[in-house]
Image (tube, rainbow, N blue to C red):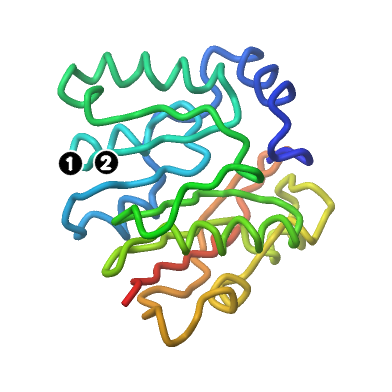
Amino acid sequence: MSEHPQDEELWDERYRSRPTLWSGEPNRHLVGEAADLAPGLALDVGCGEGADAIWLAQRGWRVDGVDVSGVALQRAAEHAERAGAEVAGRISWLHENLTAWDPGRGRYDLVSAQYMHLPQPERDVLFRRLGEAVAPGGTLLVVGHHPSDLQTTVPRPPRPELFFTGADVVALLDPDGWDVVTDTAVARPATDPDGRVVTVHDTVVRARRR
């Protein structure tokens, strides 16, 4: 997690520092929460090297994958091509700074934001904008590191304002316009720098726009 979440130069350099930065597998909470959704148009927010977008496209979704890093997007496009022309043809890669980009209103059947950690004012603006981008009947899925992770020995930036709970996300949604399907903190094992296995938690919020 970067302390400058939308710093293009920083993220480009971080990607260049490794042949691959992420696992190449789709995020587990996307798989768990979106597997039962009917395919439509999806927005993969902070798509990185493209694993989530590719997983969605393989299941029939059309996907806009957006990221601040041009290096990440180039890798994502290459990974999609290796997954096959049909998969690659369902994905559009968008090079945008998410704190300034407007995805439009009511466009997407699924908006997925996985581990987007910004300071609260910018985060609230982004999450509200992402909610507005969801079409009626569509789904907003937000996943992030839970604030309780700061009490563990797993490395996290010492900035509490970067972390959020499900309640923080739900509070941004108009209760008359949304049905909250999932609001939980999911425990999972992680290994700290000393090799110890500890328990961390992921905030997972899935909401359906009425």
- In the image, 10 versus 197, the foreground residue is 10
Name the disc covering residue 95, or none: none
Q: Nearer the viewer, residue 12 or 128?
A: 128
Q: Amino acid at mark 2?
A: Leu
Percent x, y for residue 155?
A: 74, 45
Number of callouts in the render?
Answer: 2
Q: Amino acid at mark 1?
A: Arg
Name the residue at 41% across, 29% down.
Answer: 50
**Above or below 119: residue 21:** above
Mark 2 lies on residue:
56
Residue 59 occupies which quadrant of the picture?
Answer: top left
Residue 47 pos. (x, y %): 47, 36
Quadrant of the rendering where the N terminus is positioned = top right
Label 2, residues with CA under 10 Å away: few <14, some 14-19, many ≥20: many
- Residue 160 located left or right of residue 88: right
Which residue is nearer to you in this view: 92 or 102? Answer: 102
* Residue at 78 percent of width and 41 percent of height: 3
Residue located farthest toward the bottom when viewing the structure as drawn: 176
Contact check, label 2 and label 1, Cβ < 8 Å: yes
Instruction: Classify the position of the C terminus by image quarter.
Output: bottom left
Q: Position of residue 29 (x, y in %)?
A: 39, 55
Place of residue 159 in the rendered image (x, y in percent of width and height, measured from the top left): 83, 54
Residue under label 1? 59
